[in-house]
Image: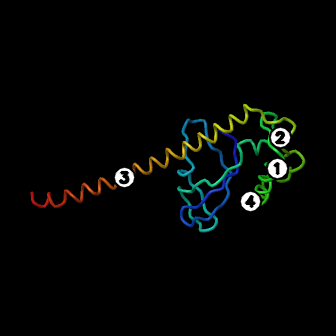
Amino acid sequence: MTPPRLTQLRCLACAAAHWAIDSDFNGIDGVFVYYLEREYRSPACGYAGAGHAVLRQTPPEFLLQPHPMYPVSRKEFDHWARILKAHFPDHPLVRELGKEFTPNTRVHRTKLHDVRRGLQDRVLSNRKAVVAADLKVVAHAATAEAAEQHMAAPLLRHL
């Protein structure tokens, strides 16, 4: 399981944006579920189901702060803390803001951390490209099958 993170989603039905707290990988059973396949409920229109698109997410380490291995700049931390406070005012970490929940700014980011972060971004980008390509293949296959059926219909009438 990966750490939970704030995720802004766009509703499939009404295109309104809303926030959820979810993990990229939700279990130890080995099954990865893409965000598009997960079921969420839109507060704007009430649609509940799959198809919500990810608009943006906190870094995975945000809700782990302060963490000695995952430093976060004060500016980045404050940005995400404002979103946490605005959309999840009852979250336990909101009460800890400025006390126990603060950024680890004492350890500076290393080149290795920046490389890891860049690789994570590329992997996510590649996953999105694969999903988009899969959707195109499915749509193309459905269109081709419909065309074959349409072309075969007159021939079948003569048999």
Left or right: 158 as drawn, with respect to 11: left
Mark 4: amino acid:
His
Residue, disc 2: 66
Residue 69 location (% of width, % of height): 78, 33
Mark 2: amino acid:
Pro
Alpha carbon separation for disc pair 4 and 2: 21 Å
In the foreground, 102 or 112: 112
Say the numbered circle drawn on residue 75: 1
- Sequence order check, earlier mark of 4 and 2: 2
Q: How many numbered marks appear?
A: 4
Mark 3: amino acid:
His
Q: Is residue 35 above or below residue 113?
A: below
Placement of the C terminus among the 4 image quadrants: bottom left
Please give the name of the residue rendered at 69% of the width and 45% of the height, measured from the top-left corner: 4
Residue, disc 3: 140
Mark 1: amino acid:
Lys
**Label 4: element kind:** helix
Placement of the N terminus among the 4 image quadrants: top right
Please give the name of the residue rendered at 49% of the width and 44% of the height, measured from the top-left corner: 130
**Label 3: element kind:** helix
Alpha carbon separation for disc pair 1 and 3: 45 Å
Residue at the front extreme?
111
